[in-house]
Amino acid sequence: MGHSTYFYLEPYVYIASGKNGILLINMLDDNTLIFNDSRSVDIMQRLLSSPKRTVHISEQDKTIPLISDTLKYFMGDLISSNIQPLQFESEINNISGIDAYHKSIITCWLN
């Protein structure tokens, strides 16, 4: 069986999903990315619902904003594997949600 490509987000990335799309914040450098194109949102929803926190992507998906931008800003990465790898779930989104990170863009984003 051949290798497949899987996408994952780094554990230091805060994720918020709102009516405007997907918001990602790199908690190490405060870099913020917003994605609202349908393919990025679809992949992100699949990633968030994956118990392994990785999602299979096609060769064409490597050019969509979610993949290319998270790679560019060290917020995500790709793994080539013949089985779906496991990425541990980040505590950043679970410990105390928005209260863990007081950034005005999050408040504006979700309202």
Image (cartoon, rainbow, N blue to C red):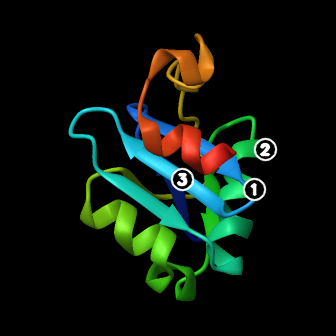
7 lies left or right of 12: right
Give the distance between the C-alpha atoms of the residues marked 2 and 3, in whole angstroms: 16 Å
Mark 3 residue crowding within 10 angstroms, few (<14) / some (14–19) / many (20+):
many
Residue 43 percent coordinates (x, y): 67, 65
Identify the residue position indicated by label 1 in the image.
46
The location of residue 67, given as percent across then percent down, is 46, 69
111 left or right of 69 in image? right
Element at label 2: helix
Question: Disc 3 and disc 1: Cα gap in Å?
Answer: 15 Å
Would residue 1 be visible to someone looking at this image? Answer: no
Q: Residue 105, image x and y in percent? A: 46, 45
Q: Name the residue that disc number 2 marks.
A: 49
Amino acid type for the residue under numbered disc 2: Ser
Q: Is residue 68 left or right of residue 18?
A: left
- Amino acid on which the number 3 mark rests in the picture: Leu
Residue 2, by quadrant, is bottom right
- Looking at the rendering, in which quadrant would you find the C terminus? top right
For the point 71% across and 52% down, the residue is: 18
Q: Secondary structure at mark 1?
A: helix
Do the residues under discs 2 and 1 have CB atoms within 8 angstroms? yes
The tag earlier along the polypeptide, 2 or 3, is 3
Residue of label 3? 23
Sequence order check, earlier mark of 3 and 1: 3
Visible residue check, residue 58: yes
**Quarter of the image where one finds residue 22:** bottom right
